[in-house]
Image (cartoon, coloured by chain):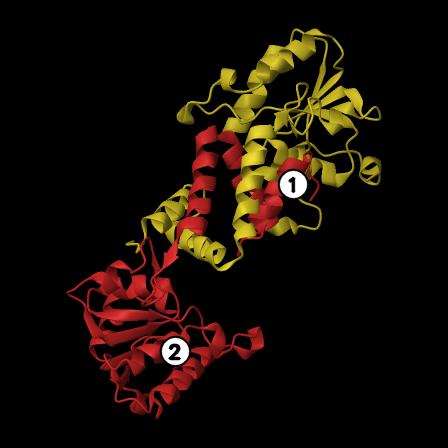
Chain colours: A red, B yellow
Amino acid sequence: MEFSSKLLQEAVDQVSFLPGIGKRTALRLVLHLLNQDQEVTTDLAKALLDLKVKIKHCKNCHNISDNAVCDICANPKRDQSIVCIVEDIRDIMAIENTEQYRGVYHVLNGKINPIEGIGPNDLTIDSLITKAKQGEMKEIIFALSSTMEGDTTNFYIYRQLEKFDIKTSTIARGISVGDELEFADEVTLGRSIVHRIPFENSLKA
Amino acid sequence: MEFSSKLLQEAVDQVSFLPGIGKRTALRLVLHLLNQDQEVTTDLAKALLDLKVKIKHCKNCHNISDNAVCDICANPKRDQSIVCIVEDIRDIMAIENTEQYRGVYHVLNGKINPIEGIGPNDLTIDSLITKAKQGEMKEIIFALSSTMEGDTTNFYIYRQLEKFDIKTSTIARGISVGDELEFADEVTLGRSIVHRIPFENSLKA
């Protein structure tokens, strides 16, 4: 694709670095911004920079937060002894939408994935173990998507936690195997939390 | 959609203002940026702001350009007496890719569209008429898309140019090269029969 302007080319290149956005879509987006008021671009750029610079991760659960501790962890009505392990914050949003869960979360920031070079040390598993050692956790709910990477991660963490007296469960497989959590409908996802089953049982099927 | 962070919400809102990008896609893009190095976001924001602040429009043809006159208008090899009228710069890029055109362009920045409140004064028609008055234009090629708005715009400009001694033409409408006849729409097939060209001419390109 040949551009009449280096500035335009640079903008299109930068936008097309985003996942799922090709050069053609990037050009459409950039031309849209060019046709809008200056403020539209300024506001967009400011929002992205502010997010990147000012955002914090909850020191407790690694959720994205404006404060040192996220709203969920800081909420006295939530049961701090039940911890739901999720892959990223989109999964928290999906589970929160069901209004079926009153415990807290632990965001792993990914799954163990040897092909992409993601090992246990790249995730927040250490901080989960630290929390387990403190002895306040009574139950851990595994809520990773049921892919091979998700199952591997579940099992790795399960083995790490065996020595502690913590009940483990996994959300019910009402969700189709291979489907992503964030796209599940609320009723199915809600039920899968209510009907969680002991982790040992999940190894059978 | 409920967010755990106002910064995150603001970023997702801003990104989802872009055309064809919903909240879910915006969240995916924003989380991608969060997982990248700081520079990725900085470079993206800088490229968009630079484009918006520093970009110029060619004073001759209204093409997007880094300079006061765009590379095409400034090229002495291009025939300044043939002007191709296009809707936006994406059409210039499409035509340039064919390497079949050696004239220059005139970018209208849209089409006459009463429903969206776009009248002739919102386009660069005045500057086209000014160029016509200077008497250097010999031919004008209409290359707007053949929608109702495109045809209306073509006809409006055609009437404005009638008083000048300028040849007008429009790009050929017909069956795409390589397309099956049986799948072509009736209007296109009909036009391609009415506007058939001498067989010898079809051997040229």
Q: What x and y, as percent, mark residue A94?
A: 30, 63
Please tell me which residue lies in front, A37 or A42.
A42
* Residue hosting label 1: A9
Query: Could you tell me which chain the residue with mark 2 belongs to?
Result: A
Which residue occupies the extreme left position in the image? A77
Residue type, numbered disc 1: Gln
Q: Which residue is mark 2?
A: A177
Q: Is residue A109 depicted above or below A32 in this figure?
A: below
Callout 1: chain: A
How far apart marks 2 and 1 lie (CA) works out to 42 Å
Of residues B161 and A126, the one nearer the viewer is A126
Q: Give the residue drawn at x 59%, y 24%.
A: B108
In this rendering, the answer to whether B133 lies above or below A140 is above
- Three-letter code for the amino acid on which mark 2 is drawn: Val
Residue A28 picture quarter: top right
Q: Position of residue A48 (x, y in %)?
A: 45, 46
Residue B164 sits in which quadrant? top right
Mark in front: 2 vs 1? 1
Where is residue B61 drawn, in percent x and y?
67, 22
Left or right: residue B26 versus residue B141 is left
- Choose the circle earlier in sequence order: 2 or 1: 1
Residue A39 numbered mark, or none? none
The correct choice, above or below, for A88 with respect to A42 in the image is below
> What x and y, as percent, mark residue B140?
70, 20
Q: How many marks are shown on the rendered structure?
A: 2
